[in-house]
C-alpha cells in the first residue's frame, strides 16, 4: 500500500469502513496503517481548508492517534468507524489512567480534544453519522468525572484498585 494517498480521492473511497474491521493480526496491521494515513489526511485538511496552524493540527491528530491506534485498534481491536461513544469514557476514565506513568488531566484533555475534532471531521466527510460525533463530544465533556477518576486513582491504597476499576471498567 502506498505511504500516502491522493488528496483528491474522497475519504469514503480511500478509507472504506470495512478496511478498519479487525479479526486477524493482518487486519490490525492494516487498520493501524490506514488510521495513520487518515490522521495525516485529517491534519493536512485542517491546515489546508480550516486554516489551522500546522502545529495545532498536528497536536489534534496526535491526541486522536493515541486513542485510536493504541486503545481502539491495538487494545480493543475495534473498527474506528463503528465505535461506540462509551469507549471514550472507558479510555479516559480507566485505560489512559492505568497505562500512563503520570496520568494528568491536561494531557488527557488534549487527547479528548483531538478525538472530538477528529470525529466531527469524519462526520463532515460522511464517514460516521453526525450524532456519533456529537456523542463523542458529550463524552469528552465529562471533565470533572475524568478529574475525579485521576484523583481517585492516585488516592488508591491497600485493596482499593478493584473498587476504583469497577466504577468505570474498560470491558465490553
Image (spheres, grey):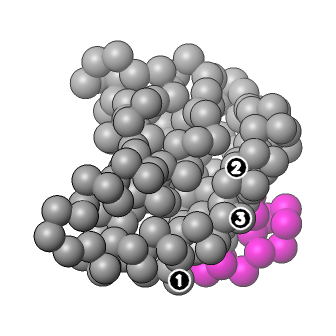
Q: Camera-side residue: 33 or 114?
A: 114
Q: Classify residue 123 by image quadrant.
A: top right
Q: Main secondary structure of the magenta part?
A: helix
Query: For mark 3, what is the residue?
Result: 141
In this rendered view, identify the residue nearer to me: 74 or 84. Answer: 84
Q: In the image, which is nearer the foreground, mark 1 or mark 3?
A: 3
The residue to which callout 1 is attached is 106
* Tag 3 near tag 2, CB within 8 Å: no
Could you say which quadrant of the image residue 45 lies in? bottom right
Give the mark nearer the N terminus: 1 vs 2: 1
- Tell me the SS state at disc 3: loop
Q: Nearer the viewer, mark 3 or mark 2?
A: 3
Residue 6 placement (x, y as % from top left): 65, 40
Q: Kindly tell me whether residue 69 is visible in this rendering.
A: no
Query: What range is drawn magenta here?
Result: 45-56
When the figure is inspected, residue 76 is found, relative to residue 161, above or below; the finding is above
Check disc 1 and report its element: helix, strand or loop: helix
Residue 85 on the magenta segment: no
Residue at label 2? 136
Residue at the spot 83% in from the left edge and 38% down from the top edge:
131
For image coordinates 43% across by 30% down, the residue present is 172
| 71 lies left or right of 25 | right
The image position of residue 27, as x and y in percent, is 35, 23
**Mark before the other along the chain sequence, 3 or 2:** 2
Report how far apart the C-alphas of labels 1 and 2 lie in the structure.
Answer: 18 Å
Left or right of 151 on screen, residue 131: right
Amino acid at each position: 500500500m502506498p505511504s500516502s494517498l491522493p488528496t483528491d480521492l474522497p475519504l469514503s473511497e480511500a478509507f472504506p469502513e470495512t478496511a478498519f474491521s479487525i479479526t486477524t493480526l493482518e487486519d490490525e496491521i492494516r487498520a493501524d496503517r490506514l488510521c495513520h494515513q487518515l490522521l495525516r489526511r485529517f491534519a493536512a485538511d485542517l491546515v489546508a481548508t480550516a486554516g489551522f496552524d500546522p502545529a495545532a493540527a498536528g497536536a489534534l491528530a496526535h491526541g486522536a492517534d493515541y486513542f485510536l491506534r493504541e486503545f481502539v485498534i491495538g487494545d480493543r481491536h475495534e473498527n474506528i468507524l463503528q465505535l461506540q461513544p462509551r469507549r471514550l469514557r472507558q479510555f479516559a476514565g480507566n485505560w489512559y489512567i492505568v497505562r500512563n506513568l503520570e496520568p494528568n488531566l491536561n494531557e488527557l484533555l488534549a487527547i479528548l480534544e483531538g478525538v472530538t475534532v477528529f470525529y466531527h471531521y469524519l462526520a463532515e466527510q460522511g464517514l460516521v453519522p453526525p450524532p456519533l460525533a456529537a456523542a463523542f463530544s458529550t463524552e469528552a465533556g465529562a471533565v470533572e468525572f475524568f478529574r475525579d477518576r485521576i484523583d481517585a486513582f492516585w488516592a488508591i491504597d491497600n485493596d482499593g484498585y478493584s473498587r476504583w476499576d469497577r466504577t468505570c471498567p474498560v470491558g465490553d
